[in-house]
Amino acid sequence: MRMTEHCYVATDDQILSGEPVIAGTRTPVRAIVELWRQGMAPETIPSHLPHLTLAQVFDALSYFSDHQDEIQQYITRNRIPDELIDPLVSGR
């Protein structure tokens, strides 16, 4: 595991092929960013991901702020195409 300049964010080639995650977990930074982009306040994210602390959430968002292009690439790469989402789930 390689720590980044952010104290709670690390990369490990054995975890999600080196995608930035919260150290000691398999939770990718992109998952936290996507919850935040959906309108979830950072303070409420730990209630949805209870294994994370508020400090870890804020550090992930700080990492995203410093590495927006990188994290956006992970978000794009892992996006489920609309045509594969069941209409009952998507609300369409």
Image: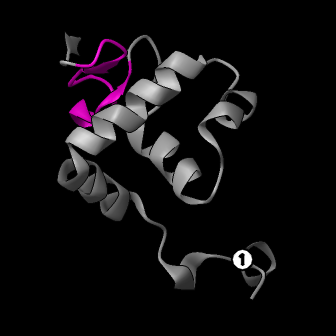
Q: Which residue is mark 1?
A: 90
State the residue in front, 25 or 34.
34
Q: Is residue 9 above or below residue 18?
A: above
15 magenta-colored: yes
7 magenta-colored: yes
Badge 1 element: helix
Q: Is residue 21 above or below residue 69?
A: above
Q: How is the image coloured?
A: one colour
- Residue 77 x %, y %: 31, 61
State the residue in front, 14 or 8.
8
Q: Is residue 56 above or below residue 87?
A: above
The residue shown at (51%, 17%) is 55
- Residue 51 x %, y %: 64, 17
For the record, the magenta segment spans: 6-22
The residue shown at (33%, 64%) is 76
Amino acid type at mark 1: Ser
Q: Quadrant of the C terminus?
A: bottom right
- Residue 16 x %, y %: 33, 34
Q: Is residue 82 above or below residue 16?
A: below
- Residue 34 x %, y %: 50, 53
The residue shown at (28%, 49%) is 71
Tag 1: Cα neighbours inside 10 Å, few (<14), some, or many (≥20)? few
Q: Is residue 64 left or right of residue 29?
A: left
Q: Is residue 31 left or right of residue 92?
A: left
